[in-house]
Image: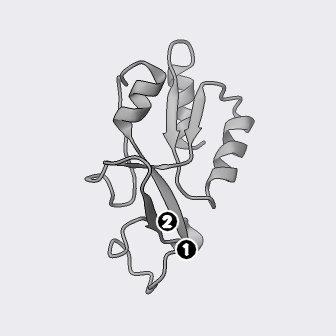
Amino acid sequence: MNAPAIQDRRAADFGKVISFEVSPRIIPQLISNLDHWASNNVFIVPKAAWNTSGELIPLYFGGAHYADTVMKDHADFGKVKPDHLAETVMLDDIVDAIGSSPSVVKMDIEGAEQEA
């Protein structure tokens, strides 16, 4: 079971899970997992959590392990050009859009935690 599905089970009766997933390689699997686990309160935001909204930032694919990252120097992929350009969104903008503050924030964003 993946992390959003687990969080969905914990929040099932009273909350929402907002999942930020920037990688176009991972989103289809995430959707499949959420469908499999009947996760009706997980909402996917296909953008990078960042300190600005509307910016396009480079995304580097991390091989078969799906360790995709926006941090070029975070992992040694030996790449010069990014594999994808990802749109950013500020967490504050999402909070404003949904009209409530989160009670828990869990981030595992491959080295970009400081930017979010």
Q: In this view, does 7 lie above or below 47?
A: above
What residue type is disc 1 on? Answer: Asp
The residue that appears at 73% across and 36% down in the rendered structure is 35
How far from the left and from the top, in percent, is residue 19? 51, 39
Q: In this view, does 48 lie above or below 78?
A: above
Taking the image as shown, residue 101 lies to the left or right of residue 30, namely left
Say how the picture is coloured: one colour
For mark 2, does the 10 Å Cα neighbourhood hold few (<14), some (14 to 19), or many (20 or more) residues?
many
Q: Are marks 2 and 1 in contact (CB under 8 Å)?
A: yes
Q: Name the residue under label 2.
A: 68
Q: Which of 8 and 111 is in front in this view?
A: 111
N-term-proximal mark, 2 vs 1: 2
Q: Which is in the foreground here, disc 2 or disc 1?
A: 1
Secondary structure, mark 1, is loop
> Alpha-carbon distance for marks 2 and 1?
9 Å
For mark 1, does the 10 Å Cα neighbourhood hold few (<14), some (14 to 19), or many (20 or more) residues?
some
Taking the image as shown, residue 32 lies to the left or right of residue 109, namely right
How far from the left and from the top, in percent, is residue 60? 48, 71
What residue type is disc 2 on? Answer: Asp
How far from the left and from the top, in percent, is residue 74? 33, 71
Q: Name the residue under label 1.
A: 83
Quadrant housing residue 1: top right
Q: Which of 30 and 87 is in front in this view?
A: 87
The residue that appears at 49% across and 75% down in the rendered structure is 82
Taking the image as shown, residue 74 lies to the left or right of residue 26, namely left
